[in-house]
Image (cartoon, rainbow, N blue to C red):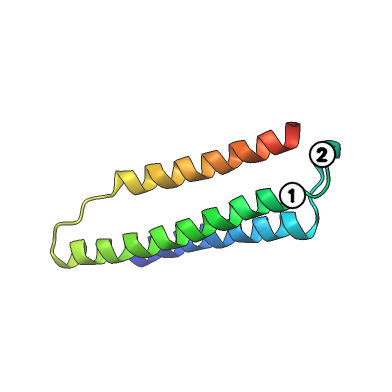
Amino acid sequence: ANERTYLAWIRTAISLMGFGILIVKLRFDPLGAARGHGWKLGLVFAVAGIVMTIGANRHYFQGLRDIEADTFKPARHWVTACTTLVAIVGLGVLLYLFT
């Protein structure tokens, strides 16, 4: 289960980074927004993906240690941190779309 959770976080991180690349490469221009600013939003997605990858790695090895020591408890803070990160990126997308 620990490995499946790790792989799910990695897939999410890759998706975030891929979406960032897509925004930059296609010069995302929703609703007539000024051209040339899509790279900033792409950078935010790329950084979010990198942060999520590092966090997934840390969480996996911490979970592995806890499982081996028979002291595993679900990490609520990790879920909250990732949810907050994705929500902030989503809000950034909304702001970008409507400003």
Count of marks, rendered view:
2
Q: Residue at x 67, y 53 (%)?
A: 42
Q: Position of residue 87 (x, y in %)?
A: 53, 39
Say if residue 47 shows up in the picture: yes
Q: Amino acid at mark 1?
A: Gly
User: Image quadrant of residue 94?
Assistant: top right
- Counting residues from the start of the chain, the first of labels 2 and 1 encountered is 2
User: Image quadrant of residue 59?
Assistant: bottom left
Q: Which residue is mark 1?
A: 38
Q: For numbered disc 2, what is the local secondary structure? A: loop
Residue 77 in the figure: left or right of residue 11: left
Which quarter of the figure is the N terminus placed in?
bottom left
Q: Amino acid at mark 2?
A: Ala
Q: Position of residue 34 (x, y in %)?
A: 83, 41
Q: Which residue is mark 2?
A: 33
Q: Position of residue 97 (x, y in %)?
A: 74, 37
* Residue 21: assigned label: none
Cα distance in 3D space between marks 2 and 1: 9 Å
